[in-house]
Amino acid sequence: MNDWKDKLKFAYSTNPDYKPEEEDDINESIKPSQQVLRVWLEKKHRGGKPVSVIEGFVGDENEMKELAKTIKTRCGVGGTVKDGDIMIQGEFRDRIISILHELGYKNSKKAGG
């Protein structure tokens, strides 16, 4: 509708063959079995309270929010989707990995110490 607003995202390129990436190509979904999700624990800047962070999800934001909702419900805790990561309140890495495996995300791994 407002094509001129999309052009504002583009700064400048000296490459005569440069073509800006289409936003639809970036958010393409891939199968859960092909995704590599990393689940790690974060305690910094949270008053010592742990948060389980899931990173590496490829897909649109609605799919990510649906996955986060499923995990929050199954763990019985709160959480959010922020900056492309899913954050679940509490230390639930093992439970989250087992839930992800049940949902078809077979390549999900525990990351960090």
Image (cartoon, grey):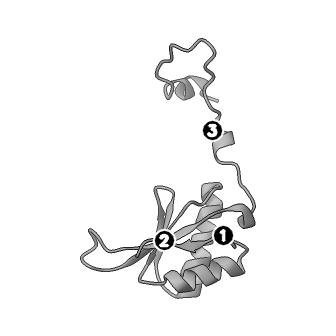
Label 1 close to label 2 by CB (< 8 Å): no
Is 92 or 80 nearer to us in this picture? 92
Q: CA distance from mark 3 to mark 2?
A: 29 Å
Label 3 close to label 1 by CB (< 8 Å): no
> Residue at 56% across / 22% down in the picture?
4
Report the mark closest to the observer, 3 or 2: 2
- Say if 44 sits above or below 58 in the image: below
Q: Earlier in the sequence, mark 3 or mark 2?
A: 3
- Tell me the amino acid under the disc marked 3: Glu
- Residue 103 is situated, as x and y percent measured from the top left of the image, at 71, 76
| Residue with the most extreme front position | 113
Left or right side of 47 for 27 = right
Mark 1 lies on residue: 107
Mark 3 lies on residue: 23
Quadrant into which the N terminus falls: top right
> Residue at 66% across / 69% down in the picture?
107
- Tell me the amino acid under the disc marked 1: Asn
- Residue 58 is situated, as x and y percent measured from the top left of the image, at 63, 56
| Residue with the most extreme left position | 47
Q: Secondary structure at mark 3?
A: helix
Q: CA distance from mark 3 to mark 1?
A: 26 Å
> Residue at 46% across / 55% down in the picture?
83
Q: Secondary structure at mark 2?
A: loop
Few, some or many C-alpha atoms within 10 Å of disc 2 (few <14, some 14-19, many ≥20)? some
Few, some or many C-alpha atoms within 10 Å of disc 1 (few <14, some 14-19, many ≥20)? some
- Tell me the amino acid under the disc marked 2: Ala
- Residue 60 is situated, as x and y percent measured from the top left of the image, at 64, 54
Mark 2 lies on residue: 111
Label 3 close to label 2 by CB (< 8 Å): no
Quadrant into which the C terminus falls: bottom left
- Say if 15 sits above or below 55 in the image: above
- Residue 105 is situated, as x and y percent measured from the top left of the image, at 68, 71
